[in-house]
Amino acid sequence: MLKTENRIASLESLVNELSDADREKFSRIYGVHSSEGWLNIPETMEPWVKKQFGSLDVVRNQRIVRVLNKVTFEDAMFNPIRSQRPMQLDGNTDLYKMLAENTNDPLSSPLEGTPADVFGRIRGRFSMTAGNVAKIDGFSSLVVFDNFNPLEFTKEQVADYLQVALWWGDEVVKIDNTARYFFFLWNCLWKAGASLVHGHAQMTMGRDVHYGKIEHLRLSALRYRHTYGAPYFDDLFETHEALGLGFERNGIRVMAHLTPTKEREVLIMGHDVGDLMKDTIYHVLRCFRDGMGVTSFNLVMYMPPFVPTDEDWTDFPVIVRLLDRGDHAGRTSDMGAMELYASTVVSSDPFEVARSLREWVPAE
């Protein structure tokens, strides 16, 4: 159903074109609300508005689409012209030159510049672990990439980073099987929250209960299954697929998210972190970097506990979420009070994201 003319502004009419079964499934999960915003533009502003936004009409009359996930209460408000807002930039915009000139930080010599975990270090082909000097949780460590530049990654390197993190989780469980809730996070460059430029990811193993937002997702999925007798994550994917926002590659599901946490959010779901999942993660990252020009991103991965618990994790898959954190040279933060306390405000169109994903994620 994904056509070149499909846009988030037309979501309501696209939903109405779905089959009865798909439309009913969509309405279980999502609510869509549109609003019109009108402005009177003074003559003194007209030349600037035309230059900045292309025309007066797109600013005079703005259509905002709000999508609410009624199961998880994830909420997003889409207005594409927000991507054309004036932004103040830093002087140095040549990112790769800047990275090439600054290759010395504590992670450049991890054996001397970082602590080790109590069970030592784990070495992969392209990375090694290091203890987190300022821990997020009791078990909290890094995967330090051999390559300084986090944007210079290959398929083999991405697979190695993920595998080293999983091996680390196995070692944690061996010494403390109450630490069983694995969480992987990759903050790429400073706009994404990285305190050091050198390529690295982080992983934690929580105790007692999974981290709050993941536990909320688990309970929301259970409530959905009890209410509708259907697996939430299957219906979530099939809803995206019906709209042309999701597709499956070798058993791995990829979606341009309808309620993104921020710009261009993509969800990847699979049964495990095998080679097919790792390959798909790489191809989506490559789409971000090479297809959409993303220079700073957040990637997270979570899954059911490493060892059995009394909780019900039925139907809960391995989930990877990644999103764009904006222009590395921009001084303006991409998140403010609205995102922190109310609803996400988004300028990217998930239908455009889906078109890029289909181009960059191979069928085989």
Image (cartoon, rainbow, N blue to C red):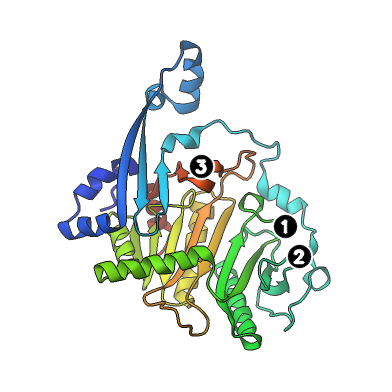
Please name the amino acid that badge 3 sits on: Met
Of residues 351 and 176, the one drawn nearer to the viewer in this rendering: 176
- SS under mark 2: helix
Query: Label 1, on which residue?
Result: 196
Q: How far is the residue under mark 1 from the one under mark 2?
A: 8 Å
Q: Are marks 1 and 2 in contact (CB under 8 Å)?
A: yes
Q: Please, which residue is most extreme toward the left here? A: 20
| Vertical relation: 169 (above or below) 191 | below
Q: Residue at x 48, y 85 (%)?
A: 308
Q: Please, which residue is most extreme toward the top here? A: 43
Residue 174 x, y percent position in the rendering: 63, 88
The image quadrant where one finds the C terminus is: bottom left
- SS under mark 1: loop
Please name the amino acid that badge 1 sits on: Leu
Please name the amino acid that badge 2 sits on: Leu
Q: Earlier in the sequence, mark 1 or mark 2?
A: 2
Q: Mark 2: few, some, or many residues within 10 Å (few <14, many ≥20)?
A: many
Residue 207 x, y percent position in the rendering: 59, 76
> Which marked residue is nearer to the observer: mark 2 or mark 3?
3
Residue 247 x, y percent position in the rendering: 34, 62
Q: Residue at x 71, y 61 (%)?
A: 148
> Which marked residue is nearer to the observer: mark 1 or mark 3?
3
